[in-house]
Amino acid sequence: MNQSIIVYGPHACGKTRNAVALARHFGLSKILDDQDADRIPSGISVDTLVLTNSDLNGTAHLGLIRCMPYARAAAAAGICNHATATSKD
């Protein structure tokens, strides 16, 4: 089993829409969506993708769980959408 990951970002950035692809990329079998980062249930330190709107910018870990912004997680998983694409103008 893999360590759980918290993916954070603003509402409507693509976290939920791409949750299955993110979980597969990181080798996680469970998804916990729309979670308050201050109320992470015990026992999810392994095998869970946690999605939150909480601002965790600058937070590398929350307890034993690694945190990463949605844009970085999406790029790592090869997901490109309006929230992660960059303009070429």
Image (cartoon, rainbow, N blue to C red):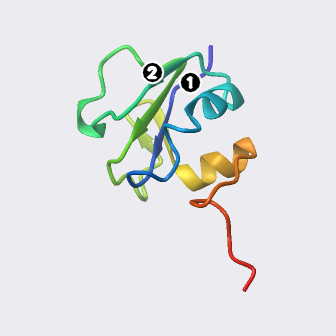
**For this view, does 88 lie left or right of residue 32?**
right
Q: Are marks 2 and 1 in contact (CB under 8 Å)?
A: yes
Q: Looking at numbered disc 1 in the image, what kind of residue is underneath it?
A: Gln
Is residue 63 positioned above or below 71 on the image?
A: above
Q: Looking at numbered disc 2 in the image, what kind of residue is underneath it?
A: Ser
Q: Quadrant of the C terminus?
A: bottom right
- Say which label, 2 or 1, has the lower sequence index: 1
Report how far apart the C-alphas of labels 2 and 1 lie in the structure. 6 Å
At a point 43% along the width and 58% down the height, the residue shown is 58
Is residue 52 positioned above or below 72 on the image?
A: above
Q: Residue furthest left?
A: 39
Residue behind mark 2: 45
**Please, what secondary structure does the residue beneath circle 1 have?**
loop
Q: Residue 82 in the image: x percent, y percent? A: 60, 61
Q: Quadrant of the N terminus?
A: top right
At a point 47% along the width and 48% down the height, the residue shown is 60
Label 2 environment density (alpha carbons within 10 Å; few <14, some 14–19, many ≥20): many
